[in-house]
Amino acid sequence: SQQGEEDPQALSIQEGENATMNCSYKTSINNLQWYRQNSGRGLVNLILIRSNEREKHSGRLRVTLDTSKKSSSLLITASRAADTASYFCATDLGTSYGKLTFGQGTILTVHP
Amino acid sequence: GAGVSQSPSNKVTEKGKDVELRCDPISGHTALYWYRQRLGQGLEFLIYFQGNSAPDKSGLPSDRFSAERTGESVSTLTIQRTQQEDSAVYLCASSRLYGGYNEQFFGPGTRLTVL
């Protein structure tokens, strides 16, 4: 199975609500990155969190990392219709060149 | 500055034909990666370049797939004798890769459809 697995697979909410997506992984990581993908094309970097960090913020985004549970979460607060996209976590297993392993993603739909 | 660019954005080809996909990384990024994304799936790693050498090509699915890179610049991914299962979005990423810190920046991808 995938190194990174997102949960839930799909999430549907109303504008203004918060959205939480989770990512679990199996082996030790160097860092973990969250990406957004619109319309199945290029990925947009959201937040990179290193293995020695526990929480990072960027605007309405908050990422947490619990290395003891091998899990991470992405929280989007006060969601907007424009947040509708697929969200992926990618783990860097610590190769010298940062090879990433991706989960299957969470499809987020925010209804206006 | 300019991000990662890829061309073409879409490619439709007939089964059995060869295709070439191009990636222009961010200037100064020594590391370059190719990934494949099938419909509704996550990204699968294909190959990694450091400069113009490819220390990890473990993700290439068959010998029909090959890639090369010119110095620390353009890379091309070639698929020979395309099959329908090759239909996917092919994404390229680049990274500065310094001090063990690696943040990869992705291009918009090439959507390949094999008829």
Image (spheres, coloured by chain):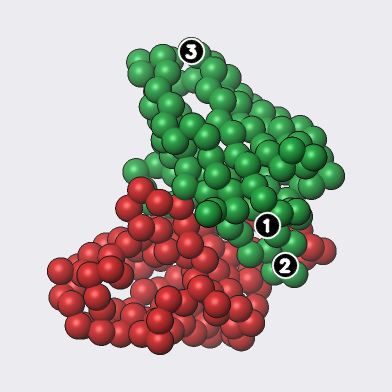
Q: Are marks 1 and 2 in contact (CB under 8 Å)?
A: yes
Residue type beneath disc 2: Thr
Q: Position of residue B61 (x, y in %)?
A: 42, 76
Spatial separation of the CA atoms under disc 3 and disc 1: 32 Å
Q: Which residue is mark 1?
A: A92
Q: Which residue position holds label 3?
A: A16
> Is B75 above or below relative to A4?
below
Chain drawn in green: A
Whether residue A51 sits left or right of residue B35 in the image: it is right
The chain that hosts pointer 2 is A
Dot 1 surroundings within 10 Å: few (below 14), some, or many (20 or more)? many
Q: Which chain is red?
A: B
| Visible residue check, residue B70 | yes
Q: Between marks 3 and 2, how big is the CA–CA gap?
A: 40 Å
Per the model, the C-alpha gap separating discs 1 and 2 is 7 Å
Q: Earlier in the sequence, mark 3 or mark 2?
A: 3
Which of discs 3 and 1 lies nearer the camera? The answer is 1
Can you tell which of label 3 and label 2 is closer to the viewer?
2
* Residue under the image location 26 percent in, 78 percent down: B82
Q: Are marks 1 and 2 on the same chain?
A: yes
Respond whether the residues carrying marks 3 and 2 are from the same subunit: yes
Front position in the image: A7 or B8: A7
Q: Which mark is residue A95?
A: 2
Q: Is residue B32 above or below residue A23?
A: below
Q: Quadrant of the C terminus of chain B?
A: bottom left
Q: Secondary structure at mark 1?
A: strand
